[in-house]
Amino acid sequence: MVTEGIQDKYVNPYTDFGFKLLFGTAMNKELLISFLNALLFREEVIKDVTYLNAEHLGTQEYDRRAVFDVYCENEKGEKFLVEMQRGEQQFFKDRSVFYSTFPIREQAKRGEWDYELKAVYVVGILNFSFDNSDAEYFHHEVKLVDLYTHKIFYDKLTFVYLEMPKFNKSEDELDSMFDKWLFVLRNLASLLERPRALQNRVFDRLFETAEMAKFTKTELSEYWDSLKNFRDWYSVISTAEKRGRAEGLEEGLNKGKEEGAREANLNNARNLKKLGVAIDVISQATGLSEEEIEKL
């Protein structure tokens, strides 16, 4: 996970304020369009987006793990739900599927309707890793697939998950617009100057928007509050993770001691049995049951 110092030059996109500022405001929709095109289509397919009301999707201020949902549609009526998720949640995949049902159900029409749907895309930008089987596989694109033919069964519902901690490309390795966007999301708050690789009109807009020196007093106050919430949350999670590792280590040591003591008792019982010592005496000496000793 990522944390930054208090003297950052640019806003932290992992905060409520930062993510909403960059992707959730109509004046910056150019940034959202560029990001979605780079992520989903690798070319300029989306020409325009209209922001929709995301309140009914269940995002609340107290849900610190779901920073901000951006819900919008393009000129074709296709729906896009983008979520920045700062920390792991046990059922985050279930929640993604649940969220996807809202853009689907909203398309129902009164009267006669043939059930034709517009495409729905659910994008999760994750500040954690959920798949540790491959350290380099961070871009998950999920669709409904026929398990027999291995072909896409339905291509209008897509889930995209980005495991941001696994993205480690340097500035010199940024080959595509997709790479550049992930580099920005991963490193923006820690940058002291604008990288040479990010010199185009879209990133002109992004760095101008993200520079805190240009914030009003109100915006700066709101940002610090949002950053404090993020850091408080991060501190709680880090403490819990450390405590969990410590408790796991202690449990492992205790289990090891117990297993070691039992193995020693079994070895002693074998030796005493070979010497012809009575079973009941061996049981009293080792704490093993007579049935266990009989099997040795």
Image (cartoon, grey):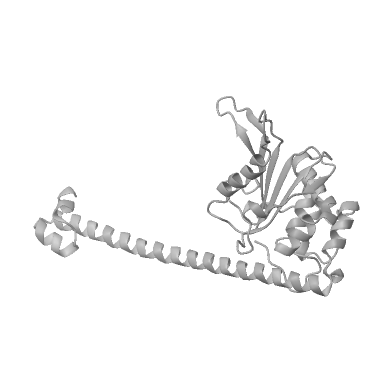
Residue 88 point in image, percent of width and height: 58, 56
Task: Give residue 4's position: percent from left, percent from top.
Answer: 71, 68
Q: Quadrant of residue 13?
A: bottom right
Image location (x, y in percent) of residue 215: 84, 70
Q: Residue 232, percent across and down?
A: 62, 71
Above or below — where is 117 with respect to 36? above
> For the point 82% across and 54% down, which residue is it?
26
Q: Nearer the viewer, residue 64 or 278?
A: 64
Report the residue at 69% width, 30% height from top. 116
Quadrant hosting residue 43: top right
Name the residue located 69 percent from the left edge and 52 percent from the top edge. 54
Q: Is residue 108 visible?
A: yes
Question: Looking at the figure, which quarter contains the N terminus?
Answer: bottom right
| Residue 131 visible, this orientation | no
Q: Is residue 64 above or below residue 35?
A: below
Looking at this view, name the residue that lies furthest to the top. Answer: 149
Q: Is residue 216 above or below residue 104?
A: below
160, above or below 282, in the image: above
Q: Residue furthest front?
A: 111
Residue 113: which quarter of the image?
Answer: top right
In front of the other: 216 or 172: 216
